[in-house]
Amino acid sequence: MRGLSLGKDGDGIEKEQQGSSNFSLLAKGDGSEVILQTIEKGKVFYVYPSEDAETLEFFYILEGECTSNVDEKNVVLKPGDYFYSQQLQDSVFFNVLTDIKMLWYTTKPAFHLISSMIGKLATVVKKVEEKDNYTYQHSGRVQKYCLQLAIMLKLSKDRLEDLYFAAAFHDVGKINIPEDILNKPGRLTDEEFDIVKRHSYDGYVLVKDLYYNNISHIILQHHERLDGSGYPYGLKEDEIMLEAKIIGIVDTFDAMTSDRPYRKGLDATIAMAELKRLSGIHYDAHLVDLFERALIVDGTLQPAE
């Protein structure tokens, strides 16, 4: 049934083991996650203050017992008991008396912090940055402006999360490009450029099994252009995902303003003028206008007189 998802015991979107704990992501949506966590007897687990004070974390004991010192009183929690935190000031630790199983609900995504797959992708991005001087911190800059545009567009929490990770990993496929091509101090040959163009598809392959369902397609499309002149498939207009259009604009701007082995980076004003010249041809005109506003707000560009 549309809008309804069913799961059986043992199912999960993604599973992880970290030390004595097992985690299974059962559901995610609108920025929230439901995680099943099991911890072995005799271990200790902590609940930490969130970076966002408004984040709610709720834990419901399904099996087992744990104990904690709360307001100088020892409290034992058993099946059916629960605890939750919001605006937590200090860390709280719990002693596990028996093997315990509990449901963990959080209003801010947390599973990516323990996901080994995301960790591996982050390692690959770091290796790409080590191979390619230009790429160093490039993904972080692209991610920053993509999120600003997502907020300006009032994208849903799910789409914002997808864009957040797609921007972070959009160049992960460059791990397969030889270093001498990445850092070539001159114009690439057609054959070399064909190798570079493969990184969109290679990135898609690397992330397609990640539980953030849409980011593989965003990465695949981030070099597509409105008039069909992009790659890898020559998609046009509405065939291209909005998130891919956003990354395409920000990625191009950062490429133009960054120093390369064969040229000095362009001034931000000149780079923006080039984006506006191709607005409606390669790039979505409304998104280009929003991006210009974002650059003015952070002081990268000066407002027109």
Image (cartoon, rainbow, N blue to C red):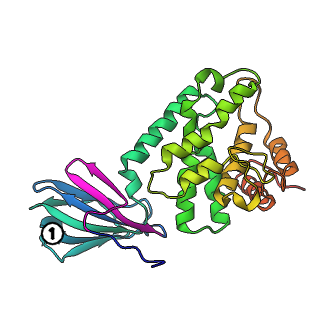
Q: Is residue 231 left or right of residue 110?
A: right
Q: Name the residue rendered at 43%, 64% in the picture.
A: 108
List the single residue furthest toward the right.
305
Image x and y of residue 271, in percent: 80, 42
Residue position for label 1: 63
Can you say whether 33 is above or below 178 in the image?
below
Count of marks placed on residues: 1
Can you say whether 161 is above or below 75 in the image?
above
Q: Nearer the viewer, residue 22 or 148?
A: 22
Image x and y of residue 59, in percent: 27, 70
Image x and y of residue 289, in percent: 79, 59
Q: Is residue 101 left or right of residue 298?
A: left
Instruction: Name the image quarter holding the C terminus.
Output: bottom right
Q: Work out whether residue 260 can be spotted.
A: no
Can you say whether 254 is above or below 196 in the image?
below
Q: Nearer the viewer, residue 261 or 224?
A: 224
Q: Quadrant of residue 263?
A: top right
Q: Is residue 113 left or right of residue 214?
A: left
Element carrying mark 1: strand
Answer whether residue 17 is magenta in the image: yes
Q: Work out whether residue 155 can be spotted.
A: yes
Range drawn in magenta = 9-29
Q: Name the residue rendered at 87%, 55% in the picture.
A: 304
Q: Residues within 10 Å of mark 1 (few under 14, many from 20)?
A: some
Instruction: Name the image quarter holding the N terminus.
Output: bottom left
Q: Name the residue rendered at 69%, 57% in the picture.
A: 240
Dominant secondary structure of the magenta stretch?
strand
Q: Quadrant of residue 171?
A: top right
Report the amino acid beneath label 1: Glu
Answer whether residue 204 is magenta in the image: no
Q: Is residue 122 left or right of residue 271?
A: left
